[in-house]
Amino acid sequence: MLKGNAILGQSGGPTAVINASLAGVIEASLKARRIDRAFGMRFGIEGVLNRHLLDLGAESAETRKRLKVTPSSALGSSRLKLQEEHFDPILKTLKQFNIRYFFMIGGNDTMDTINRVVQYTKDRGYEMIGVGVSKTVDNDLFGTDHTPGFPSAARYVALSVQQGGVLARDMQRVDQFCVFQTVGRSAGWLPAAAACAKRSPGDAPHIILLPERPFERDAFLSAVEKAHKRHGFVSIVCGEGITHADGTPVSASTTKDKFQNVEFGAMGGTSAAMILHRIISDEFGWRGEFQVTESLQMSADDRAVKLDINEAYGCGREAVRLAVAGTDGVMVTIERTSKASEPYKSGFGTISLEEVANAERPMPDKYIGKDGMSVTKAFLNYAKPLVGELPEYAQLSLKKAKP
């Protein structure tokens, strides 16, 4: 069994609970007999490349405790895509600091980074164990019931659409429609979560546009007109990555990051919500608004779900438990152990890093309504235990007075 030091990193976009996972890895590492010291990567894998490591054991117990409820990425993040010339300097740093346990918290690109780095070190005779901790608000990682970060982001979306829907309902003589855009390139889990806010047919949202279904202008405008006639206003939720049938983004953004992912919020690009706003205004002459909150969905601690915090922390601790027991090349997963009719329960499992790195998990068809612009009861059964209870607001009976 290996004995040495551990290194921890965060990568990609943040979540409201990514630091809870970090806290879990730190606490478990500092207590593990086979781990002498725990180091942090400053700005993801760039910290290893540039030999900028942090002594996490020097942090106070109070600081480590507060990490569980601190948003964003405390170590600093990175989206650096590793090239061949990076691996040798990385190996030198790992050897210099006697790193034998390699942990990173992130999505499929991060799992690919762990897999490539650990394989490179082993091919050159340096033994090291790598374990990944899942993270993404998109909820599109393969092999897990859901990812830490998704429940809190889903609650952020549901609350925003619920509260924005009340505003839109009462301001319908001023603004006839509202478009709320969520993050998420190719999976609709987050925009779909807005449906958790709906208690009656008139409640927001009325239309949900998912990346899993192509955007069809005529069908969309028909649905908008129908909802407006029925409710007096229209609430629309869209994923930032919705596309036309030919695959081109509705957002019209063509800027890509180093992993060849479209950067929907890139300078010069136009958000999907802005395009939808223009389409509706041009067709009906209505006034409306669009809401694009970008990274707030990914780091709003005030709306974090307690279940999410606890699962994220548990995933971090589980990663260390697996690593010191000799389990290598896996990502920690969350497995739902309860049925839809039972109170929510979960446990931990694993999936190989290679499987996660080379696959995505879009919403399955059983969760998407037949019209392609709504979700099914099956999805609500899946999502509501994660989002938690939402507030119930007063609604006047609007009984007209008589003289």
Image: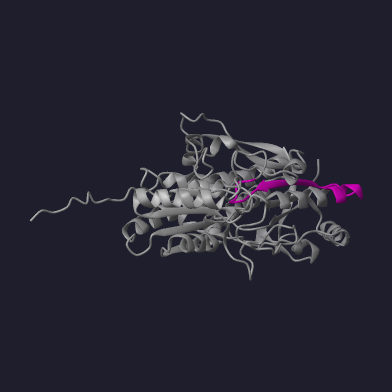
Q: Position of residue 327 (x, y in %)?
A: 75, 38
Nearer to us in this view, 270 or 384: 270
Q: Is residue 312 left or right of residue 400?
A: right
Q: Is residue 81 left or right of residue 303?
A: right
Residue drawn at x 90%, y 47% as measured from the top left: 123
Residue drawn at x 66%, y 45% as measured from the top left: 141
170 shown above or below 130? below
Q: Is residue 169 left or right of residue 3?
A: left
Q: Is residue 349 left or right of residue 231?
A: right
- Where does the magenta region start and end? 119-140
Q: How many marks?
A: 0
73 shown above or below 383? below
Q: Position of residue 74 (x, y in %)?
A: 61, 61
Nearer to us in this view, 169 or 344: 169
Specify the quadrant that holds the C terminus: bottom left
Nearer to us in this view, 34 or 205: 205
Q: Position of residue 203 (x, y in %)?
A: 37, 48
97 shown above or below 194? below
Q: Is residue 12 magenta?
A: no
Can residue 152 be seen in the rendering of this structure? no
